C-alpha cells in the first residue's frame, strides 16, 4: 500500500501500485469510470475499465459516489489531463464502504458547512490548515525544547480572571462557582520559581459575545513564562519562536501552503528582529492616516489592520497605556502612564497574535489595581504570595494559535483555523 503522495512522486511509473482512500470525484462514460481518489496525502486519478478489473468490481465502482471508501490496485501511467500528470489504470477496484449521497456539494452556504463541519473537515483546504497548524506546533515544541523550556500542565478550571472578568465562562464546580481558564499565565508564573523557563499549550476560553472574524470562545493558547527575563528579552523569545514556527510550516507544508495561496517564501523571509513601534507612535501613525483615535484609544481590529495592512513582516507595538491592559503588567519606569508590554501584530492586516509583558513585582501596585477594577482580593492571595518569597523579574506571553494560523493560511475567518470552532452561535457539532 502506498500513499498517494508516494504514487505522485512518479517513481513507480509503469509499475503496479496500490492505494486506499475515499472517492473525491467520479464520473463514468460507457465502460469506463474516472474516479479521483483522496487520502491524507493528496489526490490521484484512477481509471477503471470494464474487463480490466474483476467483473464483481465494475458495478460497485461505477455506482460508488463521492466519499465512498475504496482500495485500488493498478499500473501507474502518465496522463496529461490527470491532476499531477499521472493516473492509476486499475486492475482491481474494491469498494470498502459505499457512501450515501454526500450532503456537501460544490457551492454551499457557510451555515451548512458549519452544520456539517464533521464532514467538511475532509475538504482539501481544511486538511491543509490542520497540517500547517501541526507543523507550526512542532516548530514551537522543538524551539522550546532546544531552549531549555519545560512543558507544564496548568489547570483549566480556576477561580481567577487574568484577563477580563466580563468574558469568563462560569461553571458549577461541586457546590461553588468556578471558571474556565482564560490564560494559564498565573500558574506558569508560579512554576518559574522551580523550573525557571516554562511553557504550556492549553485551551483558553473567552465568553466573547461579539461575532468577529478573529474571536473564538475556545482557542489554543501557547504561553510561556521565564524568570530573569525583561520585556526586551521577552520580545526576542517571541521573534525566535514565531520564526521557528513559520520555518516549520514553510519547510514541511509547501504544497498545503500553496493550496491556500500562501507563498512559502513570504514566510521564510520573516526573521528577527521584527519592527517595533510604541503605542504613542502607533497613535500618531493612525491619526496621520485619518483614524479618529487619541491617547487611551484601544487598538481594535480596524486600527491594527490600518497599522499592518501594508506590512509583510510582523510588528511589535509596545508600552500601552495602563488603562488598556491587565493589572499584572510592570509599570514602565520611563513613562508611568504605560506598561512594559508588547502586542505582536501579524502583517497583511491580520493584527494581534501575541500579548506579552514583563510582570509587576510590587504587590502594593497590584493590590491597588485589583481594587480599582473591583476584584475580590481573596482569590488572588496565592498569586500575590509569589511576590513575597524570592520574587524575581520575569516576563511571559500568550500566542493565540488560531490567530497565527489565520494569518499564515490567509484565512478570512478564524473559525477555519480550527476543526470544530466554538463561537457565540455554535457548539454543534
Ligand atoms: O492578549 P491576551 O488576552 O493575553 C493573555 O491572555 C495573557 N495572559 C497571555 C500571557 O501573557 N501569558 O491573549 C493572548 C493571545 C492574543 O494575543 C490572541 O492571539 C489570542 O490570545 N486570543 C484569542 N484568540 C482567539 N479567540 C479569542 N477570543 C482570543 N482572545 C485572545
Ligand atoms: Mg491581547
Image (tube, rainbow, N blue to C red):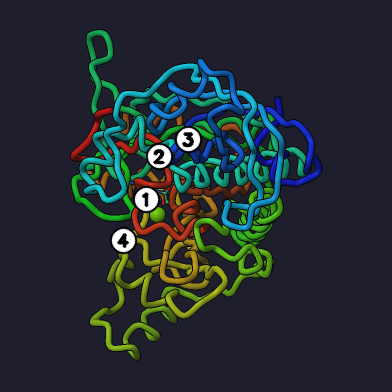
Residues packed near mark 2 inside 10 Å, few (<14), some (14 to 19) or many (20 plus): many
Query: What is the CA distance from the residue labelled 1 to the residue labelled 4?
Result: 27 Å
Image coordinates for residue 422, horizontal then vertical, percent: 30, 36
Mark toward the start of the polypeptide (4 vs 2): 2
Q: Secondary structure at mark 1?
A: helix
Q: Quadrant of the C terminus?
A: top left
Mark toward the start of the polypeptide (1 vs 3): 3
* Mark 1 Cβ and ligand 1 under 8 Å apart: yes
For disc 3, the marked residue is: 31
Q: Secondary structure at mark 3?
A: loop
* Mark 2 Cβ and ligand 1 under 8 Å apart: yes
Tag in front: 1 or 2: 1
Residues packed near mark 4 inside 10 Å, few (<14), some (14 to 19) or many (20 plus): some
Tag in front: 4 or 2: 2
Image coordinates for residue 55, horizontal then vertical, percent: 53, 18
Q: Residue drawn 48% across and 37% down? A: 33
Quadrant of the rendered structure where residue 419 is?
Answer: top left
Q: Residue furthest bottom?
A: 288
Query: What is the CA distance from the residue labelled 1 to the residue labelled 2?
Result: 10 Å
Amino acid at each position: 500500500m502506498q500513499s498517494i503522495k508516494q504514487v505522485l512522486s512518479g517513481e513507480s511509473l509503469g509499475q503496479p501500485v496500490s492505494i486506499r482512500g475515499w472517492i473525491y470525484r467520479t464520473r463514468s462514460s460507457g465502460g469506463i469510470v474516472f474516479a479521483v481518489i483522496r487520502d491524507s496525502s493528496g489526490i490521484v486519478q484512477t481509471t477503471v475499465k470494464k474487463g480490466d478489473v474483476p467483473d464483481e468490481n465494475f458495478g460497485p465502482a461505477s455506482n460508488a459516489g463521492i466519499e465512498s471508501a475504496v482500495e485500488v490496485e493498478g499500473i501507474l501511467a502518465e496522463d496529461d489531463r490527470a491532476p499531477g500528470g499521472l493516473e492509476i489504470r486499475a486492475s482491481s477496484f474494491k469498494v470498502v464502504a459505499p457512501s450515501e449521497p454526500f450532503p456537501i456539494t460544490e457551492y454551499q452556504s457557510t451555515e451548512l458547512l458549519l452544520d456539517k463541519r464533521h464532514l467538511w473537515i475532509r475538504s482539501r483546504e481544511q486538511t491543509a490548515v490542520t497540517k500547517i497548524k501541526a507543523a507550526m506546533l512542532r516548530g514551537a515544541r522543538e524551539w522550546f525544547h532546544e531552549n531549555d523550556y519545560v512543558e507544564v500542565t496548568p489547570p483549566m478550571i480556576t477561580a481567577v480572571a487574568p484577563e477580563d472578568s466580563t468574558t469568563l465562562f462560569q461553571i458549577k464546580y461541586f457546590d461553588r462557582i468556578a471558571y474556565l481558564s482564560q490564560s494559564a499565565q498565573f500558574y506558569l508564573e508560579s512554576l518559574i520559581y522551580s523550573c525557571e523557563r516554562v511553557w504550556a499549550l492549553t485551551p483558553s476560553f473567552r465568553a466573547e459575545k461579539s461575532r468577529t472574524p478573529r474571536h473564538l470562545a475556545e482557542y489554543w493558547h501557547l504561553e510561556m513564562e521565564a524568570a530573569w527575563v525583561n520585556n526586551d528579552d521577552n520580545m526576542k523569545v517571541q521573534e525566535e519562536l514565531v520564526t521557528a514556527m513559520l520555518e516549520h510550516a514553510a519547510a514541511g507544508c509547501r504544497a498545503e501552503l500553496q493550496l491556500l495561496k500562501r507563498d512559502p517564501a513570504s514566510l521564510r523571509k520573516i526573521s528577527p528582529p521584527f519592527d517595533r513601534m510604541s503605542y504613542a507612535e502607533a497613535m500618531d501613525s493612525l491619526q496621520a492616516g485619518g483614524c479618529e483615535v487619541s491617547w487611551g484609544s484601544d487598538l481594535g481590529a480596524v486600527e491594527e489592520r490600518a497599522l499592518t495592512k501594508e506590512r509583510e513582516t510582523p510588528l511589535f507595538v509596545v508600552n500601552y497605556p495602563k488603562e488598556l491592559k491587565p493589572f499584572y503588567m510592570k509599570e514602565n519606569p520611563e513613562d508611568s502612564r504605560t506598561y512594559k508590554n508588547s502586542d505582536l501584530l501579524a502583517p497583511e492586516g491580520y493584527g494581534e497574535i501575541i500579548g506579552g509583558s514583563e510582570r509587576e513585582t510590587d504587590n502594593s501596585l497590584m493590590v491597588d489595581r485589583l481594587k480599582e477594577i473591583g476584584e475580590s482580593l481573596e482569590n488572588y492571595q496565592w498569586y500575590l504570595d509569589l511576590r513575597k518569597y524570592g520574587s524575581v523579574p520575569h516576563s511571559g506571553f500568550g500566542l493565540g494559535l488560531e490567530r497565527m494560523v489565520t494569518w499564515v493560511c490567509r484565512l478570512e475567518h478564524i473559525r477555519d483555523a480550527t476543526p470544530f470552532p466554538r463561537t457565540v452561535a455554535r457548539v454543534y457539532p
